[in-house]
Image (tube, rainbow, N blue to C red):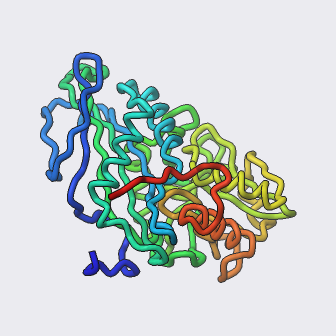
Amino acid sequence: MSNISWKELPFGYYKTDYNVRCYYRNGKWGELETTDSENITMHMAATCLHYGQEAFEGLKAFRGVDGKIRLFRPYENAKRLIRSANGVMMAPVPEDLFVKACVEVVKKNERFVPPSGSGASLYLRPLLIGTGAEVGVKPANEYLFIVFAGPVGPYFKEGFKPVKMQIVEDADRAAPLGTGTLKVGGNYAASLYSGQRAHDEGFSNCIYLDAKEKKYIDEAGAANFFGIKNNTYVTPKSTSILPSITNMSLRELAEEMGLKVEQRHIPVEELSTFDEVAACGTAAVVSPISLIVDRGTGKEYNFSNEPGTVCTKLYNTLKGIQEGLIEDKHNWNLIIETK
């Protein structure tokens, strides 16, 4: 696809050739189907439309310097989708079916996998929805699993450059014992207003505090948060945070670099003690933060306008593994055999 300006790609929907689908009916999953249609036909009483029976995932495929296509940690995404499905009483997609569908959609859209060194990747969006018709509040008996894909650039337009974020106290994305640990659409719908307001006020996104006490850092928009100080990688521990596969990977890399790793409550006031802070996730990878402003109090927490040394090393190491520049000692990548 030489006509695509790979380096200019935004993080957004891009039409590709095919997506793959699979239906759950009569208590079992069917066979994978391939289609070029971008549309879904469903009953108007489908549970995904009325009661939020929906979950999704996000993962990326990279073309390495050796020309091979690598899919990063798909089995972890499969496990997380199973947790989400169980959490909102949907039929879980078996791990092998999930990975098979992801591999198939990459193969079918191979010409859209960006070249090595372009800074772009092929983003995969697995989606699970309740399609069975119900009017009473109960789970559906039919489900649809879809995987589509498209080439994307960086999630934050700044790329690997520090961004500004805003602490909000008048909005929660999830309750402590709610769906925050699940990757379901309702959490993101709950963040739209405060996220858009943050954009309008000059910030890349907002940082949510714990919903119960409003004392501790929770999520950084649609990403996890971490901070670096005293040779330690610190990231929040909470019952309302989505377990990030990127964060999990960074914690392992941090330990290998000789850092201590702590998952614990992070009081807002502790922000002033960190040397580096960042958001992390599949879409953003690592996004350093230069400024955090508490919208309620006006207090500012300032950090470097350039990526810190630890964030840079973590980012380069993770990207290096994903793109085949660094040995994949953990076998995180699934190499996809193409023609």
Residue 173 horizontal side relative to residue 91, left or right:
right
Q: Position of residue 252 (x, y in %)?
A: 71, 51
Q: Quadrant of the C terminus?
A: bottom left
Q: Quadrant of residue 43?
A: top left
**How many callouts does the rendering have?**
0
Residue at the far front: name it. 339
Q: Position of residue 205 (x, y in %)?
A: 50, 65
Q: Residue at x 68, y 58 (%)?
A: 226
Residue 153, compared with residue 306, is above or below; it is above
Residue at the far top: name it. 26
Residue 308, compared with residue 229, is above or below; it is below
Of residues 174 and 9, which is closer to you in this image? 9
Q: Position of residue 331 (x, y in %)?
A: 61, 49
Q: Quadrant of residue 275?
A: bottom right
Q: Residue at x 50, y 57 (%)?
A: 282
The answer to whether any part of residue 198 appears in the image is no
Q: Residue at x 17, y 52 (%)?
A: 38
Q: Quadrant of the N terminus?
A: bottom left
Q: Position of residue 204 (x, y in %)?
A: 49, 70
Of residues 57 and 201, which is closer to you in this image? 57
Residue 281, compared with residue 93, is above or below; it is below
Residue 143, compared with residue 12, is above or below; it is above
Residue 213 horizontal side relative to residue 338, left or right:
right
Residue 100 horizontal side relative to residue 279, left or right:
left
